[in-house]
Image (cartoon, rainbow, N blue to C red):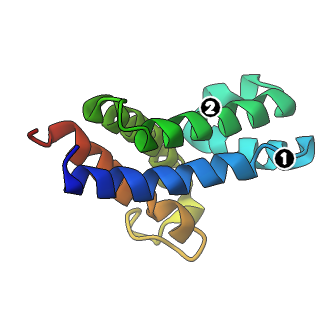
Amino acid sequence: MSLASGIMRGITGAFILNSGIGKLSLDEEGAKGLQQMAVTGIPALKELDGKTFGKFISSSEIGIGAALLLPFIPRKLAGLALCGFSAGMLSMYFRNPEMTQSDGIRPSEQGIPLAKDSWMLAIGAALVTMKD
């Protein structure tokens, strides 16, 4: 693993893993709140009940974070997982008018927490396209 790959995987993986671990104790009400936001980007998620969604989002983040941190997971596979995760997050950003300013691109105050996912998408793309 190159130093550049290790840095990108380590920082991003730790961030996502920590987020997933934090959601392990999410109660049903908290999960439903996250689900309402997620549905703006991925409408099919409304089919899940709140408890199932909470487990889904927590385990997804833990799995993606761990894949980025584990050096035996191929760089391209970890990068693809990060790209998919980030694309889902960005779909919430772009499909919710409250997240962006009137131009539909720049983040509003509410959109700043999701705007970071553009960086994670770029990191995922870099991991996929890096030469060994």
Residue drawn at the location 25% of the way across and 50% of the way down: 5
Residue 72 vs 41, above or below: the answer is above
* Rendering coords of residue 93 (x, y %): 50, 54
- Amino acid at pointer 2: Pro
Front position in the image: 100 or 121: 121
* Rendering coords of residue 94 (x, y %): 46, 52
Residue drawn at the location 48% of the way across and 44% of the way down: 91
Residue 37 visible: no
Q: Which residue is mark 2?
A: 43
Is residue 125 rendered to the left or right of residue 87? left
- Amino acid at pointer 1: Leu
Front position in the image: 9 or 97: 9
Residue 11 vs 55, above or below: the answer is below
Mark 2 or mark 1: which comes first in sequence? 1
Task: State the quadrant of the N terminus.
Answer: top left
Residue drawn at the location 55% of the way across and 41% of the way down: 41
Which disc, if any, is residue 26? 1
Name which quarter of the figure residue 8 lies in: bottom left
Q: Secondary structure at mark 2?
A: helix
Q: Residue furthest left?
A: 131
